[in-house]
Amino acid sequence: MDERKRKRMLSKRESDRRSRMRKQKHLDELVGQVTQLRKDNSQILTTINVTTQHFLNVQTENYVLCAQISELGNRLDSLTEILDFIGNNGVGFGVGSIIGLVCGLGR
């Protein structure tokens, strides 16, 4: 084999080796990115689940509190009517309408 062909062949082998190494390095980086993205995705899903549960708990608590406000407003209205009936007209101050605004009730 003549010297130029041998050098060319060796040069091509070395170039191919470097190319394979670059491809492998790129593949390793992509695999690392996939691993990190999966980890990030898992953390995001966990955060979404925790936040959703917290929202549902707060929403439930809000429903309970609005029901309690409504009940207390009804009691106050009844007591106001009783006081009005016995002659104390200065007690009524529109609590029912305030409760309606707070809890979205059509009072």
Image (spheres, rainbow, N blue to C red):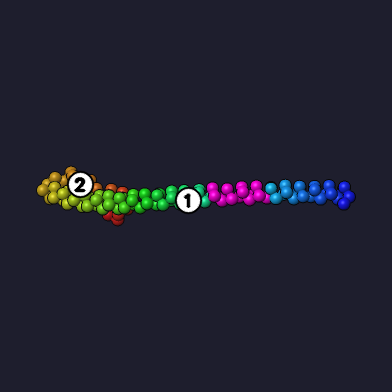
Point out the residue furthest to the bottom here. Answer: 106
Q: Name the front one of labels 2 and 1.
A: 1
Q: In this view of the protein, which residue sits in the foreground, 8 or 76?
A: 8
Question: Label 2 vs label 1: CA separation?
Answer: 56 Å
At 31% from the left edge and 53% from the top edge, which residue is drawn? 60
Check residue 27 for magenta coloring: yes
- Residue 99 located left or right of residue 78: right
Q: Which mark is residue 15?
A: none
Point out the residue furthest to the front here. Answer: 1
User: Quarter of the image containing the C terminus?
Assistant: bottom left
- Residue 106 located left or right of residue 41: left
At 84% from the left edge and 49% from the top edge, which residue is drawn? 6
Q: In this view of the protein, which residue sits in the foreground, 37 or 106?
A: 37
Q: Amino acid at mark 1?
A: Ser
**Residue 82 placement (x, y as % from top left):** 13, 50
Please state the extent of the stretch shown in magenta in the rendering: 23-36
Point out the residue furthest to the left here. Answer: 86
Earlier residue among tags 2 and 1: 1
Q: Which mark is residue 42?
A: 1
At 54% from the left edge and 47% from the top edge, which residue is drawn? 36
Q: Which mark is residue 92?
A: 2
Say few, some or many: other residues with alpha carbon within 10 Å of mark 2 (under 14 / 14 to 19 / 20 or more).
some
Q: Secondary structure at mark 2?
A: loop
Marks 2 and 1 close (CB-CB < 8 Å): no
Q: Secondary structure at mark 1?
A: helix
Q: Amino acid at mark 2?
A: Gly
Per the picture, the main secondary structure of the magenta-coloured stretch is: helix
Say few, some or many: other residues with alpha carbon within 10 Å of mark 1 (under 14 / 14 to 19 / 20 or more).
few
- Residue 13 located left or right of residue 38: right
**Residue 80 appearing in the image:** yes
**Residue 64 placement (x, y as % from top left):** 27, 52
**Residue 66 appearing in the image:** no
